[in-house]
Image (cartoon, grey):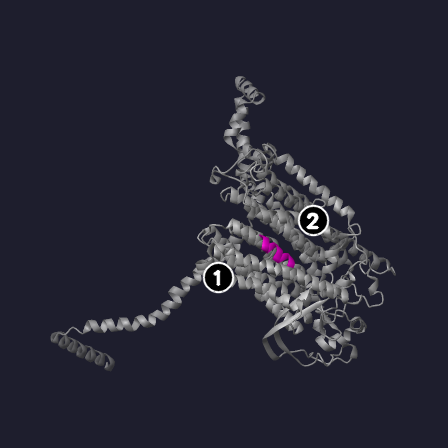
Amino acid sequence: MDTISLCLILIPALPLAAAIIVALFGASVLREASHWPVIVAIGGSFLCSMLLVREILAEQSKQPAEATGFERVVTLWTWANIENAYDLKPTAPSEDAATAMTPSDAGWKDFRIDVALRADALTSMMLSMVTFVATLVAIFGAGYMHGDRGYWRFFAYVGLFVFSMTMLVSVSNFVLLFVFWEAVGVCSYLLIGFWYTKPEAAAAGMKAFLVNRVGDFGFALALFLIWTTYGTLNYHDTLRDGTTNPESIAKVLASSERDLVNVYGADAVAKKSLVRGVLGQLRLQDGLYVGGAVATAICLLLLVGACGKSAQFPLHVWLPDAMEGPTPVSALIHAATMVTAGVYMITRCTPLFMMSPTAQLVVAIIGGFTALLAGLIALTQFDLKRVLAYSTVSQLGYMFLALGVGTFAGITGGMFHLFTHAFFKALLFLGAGSVMHAMGNVIDMRQFGGLRKLMPHTHWTFLCGCLALAGLFPLAGFWSKDSILGAVHEKVHELEHEHHHRAHGSDHPPAHVSDPSLSDKVVVSPLASLSDAELVRFAWIYNVLYYSGLFTAFLTAFYTFRAFFMTFYGEERIPPQAGHHAHESPPLMTGPLMVLAVCAVIIGVIWMRDGAKTNLLVEYIGHTPSLAAGLVATTRPAVGEFHLTVAALSSVVAIAGILLALYLYLGERTEANFLRDVFELKGVERFTDPQWVLKLEQVWWIGQPVRWLRCVGLGFVVTAVGLMLGVLSMILAIPLLLGQFMSPYRLSQNKFYFDELYYGLIVWPLRLMAQVCYWIDRWIIDGLVNAFGWFPQAAGSLMRSLQMGLVQFYAAAMVLGVVVLLAARMLWAG
């Protein structure tokens, strides 16, 4: 067995073995030492991940220049094999050899699911990041969870969680991806509801589980559609078939609409369910490529699954409530593992999304809107962990925005931000856990103040995380955020250039086809299927998303340093729950903070070369086969570019956000209270308050004219004015009540009422429907069934009551019976 295969097996196997050991022996044998197997196992997985990266780099260096990346699939065993499960034959034969099926594609195809692991650049990057952060989180958890009754159970769950996540990013087909997609969901349910005796924790775990089921339903439908469309669920079959065959693309471009009608019928062609290679990279049969409605449906269903797992609108509501779990769980789930699964899945399915610019635009819109929405909500939260939770939702929105750009720069920029975000967001969550540990599990920032003197290590490491999250030079967030905003900015120019190119009939190629290695090949633009009107509309939307991203950068810097200043600066305040011995966390907890702080500072800049024009990590990710070939490769620039203007602008808005937070929240925070009063419409509320209106008479420039009017006998004027003010107050009362709930501050503070909205529109109707169904089942369906049992019982009871054992009663009954029979006979005869 070679090194790559061995590493692929050991990386998930080690955490699984540790989880089994702790589950079996943690309660009885290991007890307070239950953390050791998990820490050692995850640390070993990290070393194997780094060895895997080295081996892949060595294999990449051996490949020729024209190679489209390196990949290795290691098949362990066959899980399912159903012969002749799918018929690839078209409904009618094609008369043109250009669209005829090849012998290898004709006939039936087997449904085969192999338990196989995949090694490529994208997988190795995800594995190294997940295992490194998980190792530090496990070390921190050993100090944070010390003394907890479920200590061993916590580490068993963590080991199982890391196993599920490493398998999710390692598997080589959609079926196993879905299996471990569900596995991380189950593990997150166990970890979020770890303190299940707390009603809030139990409800949060159930909420996360149920909301993710909505997204998983869409994911499952996407898998069915992929299978019925392509006859395979393997990545290397589905995502690469036909991507590097320019001759096939040329055949398709040369074929006529009549050929498509002959094969698939006029209806399919009219609905543009099939396009002639314009978006061509997923082959349904030789020379014909799926696009239009089919591609969009598959991509949107995949997006539903990704939105659930990565907490994107409208399935974002579960993640803030997940803060009820232990803080190391928050760092693990919300930094490097579960929430990144959706971003990884969309990146892995890049060739699918490249077929549908419409689906890409939807991804970008959802990402940009979620980033802005979560940033607005984070402005007014006082729970430190919830501020970080909404920050995570916002940063994931940035990643989705980047993936929705649909260019090489956007996709790799999104993954670069995923990589850097894992480090500084884990640092911030663990820093919040350090504060909670010292403050008696209190997390309300209004009860904190001046903690920098008590917790200097936590203070300085938390500052590094805040600076990185705000995106200040030269920390990690600066480079990754610039790559995203720069990619969106370039997308706008690309769309505008394409429209200008068509309008003026220029002979120059589109701006995004810039790789000289493609000069001798047939190049198909990913934008070729868009009409001129769509190009203009798409350019306008992406431009709005670009400026929305800049504004979100301002919000990010503001709410991040708002939390920092409220916690570590101002007058020293310690909650009573902390007692009189509040102090810095032990080295077992501050050690991982220091390591992550160093990473937050250098993990972005260490990859930069040639004046930041070359990003070594992006170059490494770019060797993933699904990113190194096909249409996405046509968007890869020949020379890297550093967007100096975009970086400067985003830095300026970030600094403005920090300065505003400094002004409002440092010191006594009177300005912040004033700002809150403004946003809560205090002036309108006072105007409609009768007591406040009566007090106006005490103001000399109001009271003096009133007294003068009364003295000269014009008191009725004062009365009339008072009546008018009363009527006006009544008129304003209705919008005031609405304003109290819909003011900007209240909207942000109450999370735009999404929980209440979902409860009113979804949860309550479903509960009512369930109660009605229960009543029908209990009293109608069960009642009818039980009636057939009650009738014989009632008849038997009646018969038993007649068996009295008295001869006189029996004789009287016989006489009565004879009388009844005679009477009936006489009536019948008459």
* Disc 2 residue type (three-letter): Ile
Secondary structure mostly seen in the magenta stretch:
helix
Residue ID for mark 1: 23
Query: Which secondary structure, mark 1?
Result: helix
Q: How many marks?
A: 2
Between 516 and 543, the residue placed more toward the observer is 516
In the image, 158 versus 196, the foreground residue is: 158
Q: CA distance from mark 2 to mark 1?
A: 38 Å
When the figure is inspected, residue 105 is found, relative to residue 478, above or below; the finding is below
Looking at the picture, how far across and down is residue 504, in whole percent?
86, 58
Quick one: which residue is furthest to the top in this view? Answer: 711
- Residue 18 in the image: state x and y as whole percent: 53, 61
**Callout 2: SS:** helix
User: Residue 144: x and y, percent?
Assistant: 52, 49
Compared to residue 489, the image places residue 671 above or below, namely above
- Compared to residue 422, the image places residue 301 above or below, namely below
Q: Which mark is residue 602?
A: 2
Quadrant in the picture for residue 614: bottom right
- In the picture, which quadrant includes the N terminus? bottom right
Residue 126 magenta: no
Q: How far across and how far down the image is residue 754, in percent?
A: 56, 50
Is residue 705 found left or right of 403 in the rendered image? left
Visible residue check, residue 584: yes
Question: Is residue 134 inside the magenta stretch?
Answer: yes
Sequence-wise, the earlier of marks 2 and 1 is 1
Disc 2 and disc 1 in contact, CB within 8 angstroms: no
Q: 569 left or right of 503?
A: left
* Magenta part of the chain: 128-136
When asked about the image quadrant of residue 446, the answer is top right
